[in-house]
Image (cartoon, coloured by chain):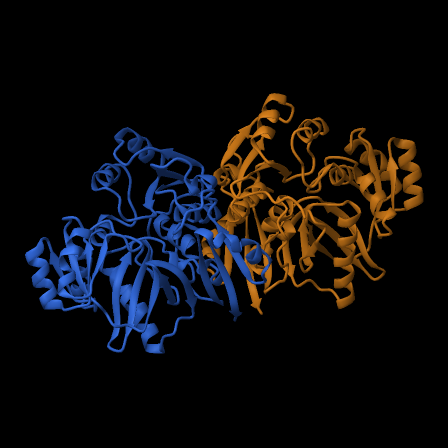
Chain colours: A orange, B blue
Amino acid sequence: MTDILPQGATIGILGGGQLGRMLSVAASRLGYRCHVYDPGANPPAGDVCAQVTTAPWDDAAALRAFAASVDVITFEFENIPTATLDLLEAAKPIRPDRRALSVSQDRLTEKQFLRDLGLMTAPFLPVSDAASLTDAVAQIGTPAILKTRRMGYDGKGQARIMSAADAPNALAEVVGAEAILEGFVHFSHEVSVIAARGLDGQVAAYDPGENLHQDGILRQTTVPARLSGSQRADAVLLAGRILNALDYVGVMGVELFVTPQGLVVNEIAPRVHNSGHWTQNGCTVDQFEQHIRAITGLPLGDAGRHADVVMENLIGDDMDRVPELLAARDVALHLYGKTERRAGRKMGHANRVVGRG
Amino acid sequence: MTDILPQGATIGILGGGQLGRMLSVAASRLGYRCHVYDPGANPPAGDVCAQVTTAPWDDAAALRAFAASVDVITFEFENIPTATLDLLEAAKPIRPDRRALSVSQDRLTEKQFLRDLGLMTAPFLPVSDAASLTDAVAQIGTPAILKTRRMGYDGKGQARIMSAADAPNALAEVVGAEAILEGFVHFSHEVSVIAARGLDGQVAAYDPGENLHQDGILRQTTVPARLSGSQRADAVLLAGRILNALDYVGVMGVELFVTPQGLVVNEIAPRVHNSGHWTQNGCTVDQFEQHIRAITGLPLGDAGRHADVVMENLIGDDMDRVPELLAARDVALHLYGKTERRAGRKMGHANRVVGRG
């Protein structure tokens, strides 16, 4: 029997973007309050939470006061500084915990962890300088992609290497950071599994969604994905294996490449995931509520899917389409309240239900 | 063309209970922020809104500051003091407006308005003293029910008159307030229509729900309701007639008695309504988002129903059933974050989806 957070308890959320915003709304449905910590002023989550702290990640006094005011801590992004986690962890449980973060914060650790679990990944080698890059390119071949080990998201901190001659420029791109060279995976499409593990070890996984990226940013997720029955089962089983190996608590996004040789794990995200937004209109318990259930010790909800959904991100000028989307049948809009529109900025998403049953 | 509130605009909500709470969440999905005004400390809506003002209804300075901070004002309950409305109305638009409030704040005005529209109501007569009560009982007959004209809700301020001898006690119950005597309506069941009218005059109505009350409090709403095709059409048409007659903007709940002679209007509520909570899990656009769309000038959403739902209120000790409801399939929980449990207090509700299509 696990400890269940009582009604009215407070959940601390590190990061106040759209994921924190939707987590806070889900927490309210379960009778919890949220306190959001974000270095930026007026974070999107601030519109729908009980309390906001605006302070940098290294403000020890603010972090201590935040930790004192909450019952459990979670986060909406994985690149939280280590010192911040050290300080918070001493005061209150962080879920998911450090192990999941340390694996996902470092692409090399992540790939090694996945390989050790017996899962397929892209071929990879660590790169720290020109010599090790030359060796890695020779072993892995081209095309390949050089990525910083840490802090990469939405295609940043990455450089393609189409031939050995590209290596010097690629190295300049990652400006001396510890890096990893990954071989290209020839895949037909990408899917992701959104899975959850409760405090009691129970696991639940949503039906995999099929993802479409553009310029390194997720544009669209469609459920059901194009997968055979055995691929679908494989996807869910491998996600469960990852969660159990980490003794994980919360929701995780697992991105997979579909290849003729099987499913190759691209990356894992120890948090609710953009490719799981379709669950808001396709499932009784969406990924945000599922995460809150997990970290508060509640039983996980049924992850069954009752609709076919196409989730589309609204990025930058996609907001011009809001009037049309508001008028469309079977479209649920989820806007993030960001008043400043920028190219590449995620402003909202729309879930279009294309079939039910 | 109507003025549409821009992204990031602020909606003022009078009253911070569960209706205000769910309105604020819906507003966030459309990119709006909410400022809640409530005399009580820590209102449920305070967990999910951008700003809270805790001040009495007669605090002119607080009301002015509130009005100055918002772009439009709405409310979650109809018994707002007249002086409060006078002050706010001078500063910002209130939607729905005074006319809807004046009709629904007074049972006598309400009944007369409905009768003037050609709609059926219970027989009624005004009562101000013992003599007029005796006359009214003689004309209307027994059983009948004496109700205060103002401030009644959840069965309070009411007294049954089973025979003329009950009259003195009934009068004592309403303690000299202006009252109305209503004749009993022999009905088979009660239904309600949740309907909306936009700033542009567009009207949308949800499928009627069938309501079950206990001790004067709504226990359960089921969709679809037991209604013939023509009854269903009548219900929706009469709701539209009421909205148009009031030049109404927002969501309204219309309670109807089903009788062999037709539909009798019991009462109207100029706000989102407990009997419309099923729309959260039965429709793409729920009553809360529909209300926000209406008052912000956005087009109304499709009110189509995609599921059969049983909505059950969780009152007082019903909260003991939360673990069972969390574990049930196809049940969506909506808790209000109230830490103090009291008999008769609405603590949350559960929407059980019992069929899809």
Looking at the picture, tell me which residue is in the foreground, A120 or B167. Answer: B167
Specify whether A321 is left or right of A203.
left
B49 w.r.t. B203: above or below:
above
Kindly indicate the quadrant of the structure image that contains residue B36: top left
Kindly indicate the quadrant of the structure image that contains residue A12: top right
Q: Is residue A162 visible?
A: no
B291 w.r.t. B231: above or below:
above
A178 w.r.t. B239: above or below:
above
Looking at the picture, tell me which residue is in the foreground, B217 or B11. Answer: B217
A292 w.r.t. B202: above or below:
above
Q: x, y percentage for residue B116?
A: 15, 64
Q: Is residue A265 visible?
A: yes
Q: x, y percentage for residue B175?
A: 17, 48
Specify whether A244 is left or right of B174.
right
Q: x, y percentage for residue A21?
A: 54, 42
Q: x, y percentage for residue B70?
A: 36, 37
Task: Please name the residue shown 27% across and 78% down the image.
Answer: B260
Q: Residue furthest front?
A: B165
Task: Please name the residue shown 31% across and 35% down the image.
Answer: B67
Task: Please name the residue shown 23% across and 54% down the image.
Answer: B104
Specify whether B306 is left or right of A239.
left
